Every structure is written in C-alpha cells, then in structure tokens.
Image (cartoon, grey):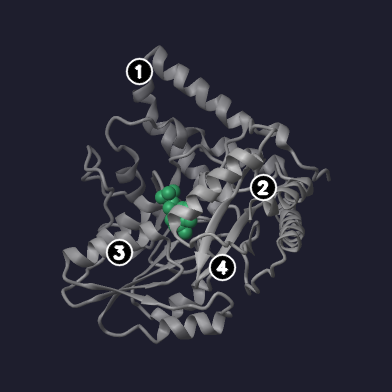
Amino acid sequence: MDLSPRPDLWSLDPDVLHLNHGSYGAVPRRTQELLARLRTETEANPMLWFRSVADRLTASRLELARFLGTDPAGFALVPNASAGVTAALGAIPIGPGSRIVLTDHTYGAVRYAAERFARAHQAEVVVVDVPLEADDDSVVAAVRAELDERTAALVVDQISSATAMVFPIRRLVEACDGIPVIVDGAHAPALLDNPAEDGADFWTGNFHKWPAAPRGTAGLVVAEKWREATLPLIVSWSEYDERLPERFDMQGTFDYTPWIAAPESLRVLADLDWPVRRPQLSSLIDEGAQVLAKALGTDLPDIVHPAATIRLVEIPFSAQRSSEAGESFKIRVSRELKAEITLTGFDERIFVRLSAHAYNSLRDYELLASRLPTLL
Ligand SMILES: Cc1ncc(COP(=O)(O)O)c(C=O)c1O
C-alpha cells in the first residue's frame, strides 16, 4: 500500500508550509472540480437545478451518515458546528435558575452560544476546569462534581480546539445520567470512528475540517427523543416536515453545492486508504512535533489522548501574551516564514497547534523548525 504524501491531490500553494488543517480544512482538487461542475449546472438553468436539489441532498446525506456510522433518520445537514450547537441548545428546555455546564476547553464561539441561551432563559453558564494533562477519570470526576438537579445540559468537546484532547464522551454521557449532553465534535469526523455513537442527545461535527469537504458542510446527529423538538436556525418551507433530516435540508435560497459535493471528499479519503493513513499521520505528527519542540527548546505537553493528527508544541513566546500579539505573530510567520500555523493558549501556556494531513511530509515540520526560532 502506497502511503506517500499526496500534495498533488490538493491545490495548496507549494511555496507555503500548510500546518494548520484544523482551522479551515483544505478541499482536494477532485471535490473542487465537482463543485465547479455543479455551479456551472446551476447557472445553466437555475430552475432545473433547484428542482433537483432535494433528491441530491438526500443522496448526499445518506453517504455522509454512512461515513459517520450513524442512523440517517437522526442525521441533519447544518452549515457548521456552530450552527449544530446552536440548534441543539434551542431544542432543550432551559429553565430560570438552571445551569449549562461547559469545560474550560470549550471553543469560544460555542461558549458564546451557551451564554446567549443562558441569558435568554435567566440561566447561568458554569465552566468546569479540566487540567491539560487530565486522564479520563479526572475529566469525568471534574465534570460530575458540577452536575446537579439544576443542570440543563452539558456541552462538551469531543476533540477540543485549543488543546486537541479527546474527551471520554461515553463516560460523560453515563455520568450525566439523563441530563442532556450536547457533543461538539467539530474535529471528530475522520479523526474518530463512529464519533456520533456514544449515546449523547446531540452531536455535531464538521465535514469541512478533517474529511476535507467543501466549507459549510457539517452534520447534526439527534437522539430520537429530541428529533421533533430540534429545529433548523432558518425558518423555511420545511418548517412542518416531521422528518428531522428533511426539515434541515431546505434552508431557503442558498448554495447547496457544498453539501452535494461533500461525499466526493469522502471518496478521496477512501482512495487515500484513510483507515491506514490516519495512524501513519499520527506517527508523522508525533515526529514533526518533536522536531519543532527540539528547535524551540520546549517540551511537549503530556496529553493523555491527543487527537490523531493534531499536536501542541509549547512556544517560548516572549511577546506580550495577548490575542493581538498572537495574531500579529501568526501574520509574521505567514509573511516572513511562508508557514501557516495557529497558536492556542491554555493555562497561561502558549502552543503552536500543528496538524498533519495527507499532503504533509516530515520535511514540512523540519522546515518550520529551522525557521520559527528566527522570529522568537
Ligand atoms: C471544537 C470546535 N468547536 C466548534 C468549532 C466551530 O466550527 P465552525 O466554525 O465550523 O462552526 C470549531 C472550529 O474550529 C472547533 O474547533
């Protein structure tokens, strides 16, 4: 089996080190070409195109649900994980005085969503501290300690953004014992097998991250008891459709081509032997992170369950530790070093969050390691 790097399948600028797939993904050429054909078809006859959309969405949904290993009757398309979390928060009862429990790893925009719902219902948001190097027992114990009869929901990352930790979702669902659990699986598709099958009430995840689907493609998986109450964020003609997936399909006049083209990226992953390639990328990112840490003279945090293709490398960041300083550093890395990285912060520590996808090779990390110290 040939597992050599395949940058040729993407259209990424070869003069740039692309080491942050996790933020916005990257769409392979084949999917881009299909998207372009679908858009040409739309513009050849918009009326004909829109008459065909419903059937094409059904076909796409079935393929995406199969990829996740989930029941298609509970799988709806949403534009992104933010929309998935928002729709889930809109479905659960949140009474005055109740609490929405999160962790300090929760993605910032997801925390804002919880805060919006808490404000609207005179509820409050409670943030559980989970140490970076916590094992599953400590994660479950920390969350369990904040659950009580006031808890309206637990909103928890499956793979955290800033820290790239895999959370023990099945055990957290058990600990919640009937309290609704909303899983933010933004990074989970293609990094975890059957990510939506841990028994949570709601799960959402992005196809536009690791599965490399066109941007604006995400899924929302809803447990049977919540399907009737779960509504899309845009009220449109399918408002009274009793079937969850169809209710989310038609969101007014909108560009549906990314949703229809998304399965092509799943076929690219299949052709890349993803189940075998993913562990190979884990070894690559381990090696790449070590090369960078050595160059920076720092240690790698000891994360118990790191995400398959993401690693944190601590950076001895002497500049002021503000988000503006971080942004301007990333811009300098992009302009002066021709490298795309992201920085994350947790517990007063700043990390480079490195990624590996099928287009990366060890040389990418070696080059970053030779260049990054020049900016510190
Ligand atoms: C953990 C997590 N949740 C939610 C999101 C939001 O995803 P989107 O921008 O696709 O809504 C992200 C994006 O990076 C994320 O990492």
What residue would you read off at disc 1? Answer: 46
Tell me: residue 37, above or below residue 369: above
Front position in the image: 203 or 111: 111
What residue would you read off at disc 4? Answer: 166
Mark closer to the chain start, 1 or 2? 1
Q: Is residue 90 left or right of residue 196?
A: left
In the rendering, at what x and y percent does residue 73 appear? 40, 52
For badge 1, the amino acid type reads Pro
Q: Residues within 10 Å of mark 2 (few under 14, many from 20)?
A: many
Mark closer to the chain start, 4 or 2? 4
C-alpha distance separating marks 2 and 3 = 31 Å
Mark closer to the chain start, 4 or 3? 3
What residue would you read off at disc 2? Answer: 357
Q: Residue at x 28, y 48 (%)?
A: 232
Q: Is residue 10 left or right of residue 345?
A: right
C-alpha distance separating marks 1 and 2 = 36 Å
Tell me: residue 198, above or below residue 148: above
Mark closer to the chain start, 2 or 3? 3
Q: Quadrant of the C terminus?
A: bottom right
Secondary structure under tag 4 reads loop
For badge 4, the amino acid type reads Val
What residue would you read off at disc 3? Answer: 114
In the rendering, at what x and y percent does residue 225 appear? 32, 65
Q: Quadrant of the N terminus?
A: top right
Secondary structure under tag 3 reads helix
Q: Residues within 10 Å of mark 1 (few under 14, many from 20)?
A: few
In the rendering, at what x and y percent does residue 346 appear? 50, 68
